[in-house]
Amino acid sequence: MGGRFATRGRKVGALPSTPRRRAVAEALAAEEEFLSARRLHRRLAEAGVNVGLSTVYRTLHDLVRLGSVDLVRDDAGERLYRHRPANDHRHYLMCRHCGHSRALDAGPVERWADGIAARTGFTEIRHTVEVTGICVPCAAPDRRRPEDR
Amino acid sequence: MGGRFATRGRKVGALPSTPRRRAVAEALAAEEEFLSARRLHRRLAEAGVNVGLSTVYRTLHDLVRLGSVDLVRDDAGERLYRHRPANDHRHYLMCRHCGHSRALDAGPVERWADGIAARTGFTEIRHTVEVTGICVPCAAPDRRRPEDR
DNA sequence: CTGGACATGAAAATCACAGTCATCTAATGT
DNA sequence: ACATTAGATGACTGTGATTTTCATGTCCAG
């Protein structure tokens, strides 16, 4: 399956536009929260899209490299992916219980990070900031959101 | 091997002082850089200390929980450990090439993170900040430090 | 139609790390 | 001293996510 898609409008910095890759990218874009590759794969299967796990991983990997998807790790080190909205937020506050996330204004952090190169001589500075907590609904003893893992 | 060490001066927040655990802790403390559990295990073996990988993992796990060791993840998600010096710095700038690291003054980040709970309603806020780059020696085309992985 | 260039997915391989459990050790009671 | 015993140890096995392999399918150009 699949074919010589590379010649079909592949631009530098773009994903080879095959039906499955598009399906993966769209399924992720349709989600609000961070998803594991496995979970995304399940969603696709449930939606009737038959895609191999390998392809999901490959596509996510590419999407991250292209910068259109954000990658964080949960406590266990598992990778969670989320489509990056247009307004290029890069830092989120994520609930450790239900996975719900919201963007953070990371202005102070960005400014701090930007100054590091100048202060240390290091080059090609990259930074990741991960903030987690327990969201309000999950903190309530009742009405816990399902984890549907 | 090992014995009833628990009664031998175990205080709350201290590691059971067995020879092997001490060996692990000391081997890590002797290192400047972040090390993977595997690598630390190899160092110990090379030094003639025969410790099982399980014990290395267990000890590192405990040390992290006790707060005397810092834990970060490399690009591949592998856990890297480093003895935390007395002056309780929690954020480092690590070289992606050689692993060399230096502490950062993360004051601005800490203050920013501290305010998040109040601003969002989330509880039990935790944050990790990882900053990487290429250090000055590694940026020079010659004289690259060995990676010895 | 044919060949080349990928894409694909099932299965197998990796890999770090977490459990298991029989065994061993040293502190303690006698 | 010696038996007792809580707890440490490590070879081995389990686990679960991610990656690689490889045989096969598909599309496009010539």
Image (tube, coloured by chain):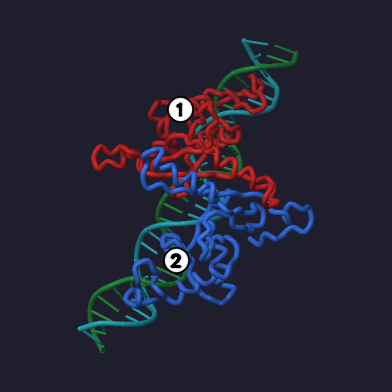
Chain colours: A blue, B red, C green, D cyan
**Residue at 60%, 35% in the rendered image:** B65
Q: In the image, which disc is placed on residue A59?
A: 2
The chain under label 2 reads A
Left or right of A149, for residue B98: left
- Residue A38 picture location, percent across and down: 54, 62
Asked if residue A26 is positioned above or below residue D13 in the image, the reply reads: below
Q: Residue at x 45, y 27 (%)?
A: B27
Three-letter code for the amino acid on which mark 2 is drawn: Thr
Reply above or below: B6 against A144: above
State the residue in front, C25 or A62: A62
Residue in front for this viewpoint, B84 or B57: B84
Dot 1 and dot 2 within a common chain = no
Position of the N terminus of chain B by quadrant: top right
- Give how far across and how far down residue A149 sits, in percent: 63, 60
> Label 1 is placed on what type of residue?
Ala
Q: Residues within 10 Å of mark 2 (few under 14, many from 20)?
A: many
Give the CA separation, mark 1 to mark 2: 41 Å
Secondary element type, mark 1: helix
Q: Which mark is residue B79?
A: none
Residue A7 percent location from the top left of the image: 32, 76
Q: Which chain carries label 1?
A: B
Q: Which residue lies at the image location 60% right of the left edge and 27% below the top edge?
A: B15
Q: Residue B13 lies in what quarter of the image?
A: top right
Residue C15 higher or lower than B59, as above or below: below
B97 relative to D10 in the view: left or right:
left
Residue B27: mark in rendering: 1
In the picture, measured across the screen, residue B112 lies left or right of residue A116, that is right
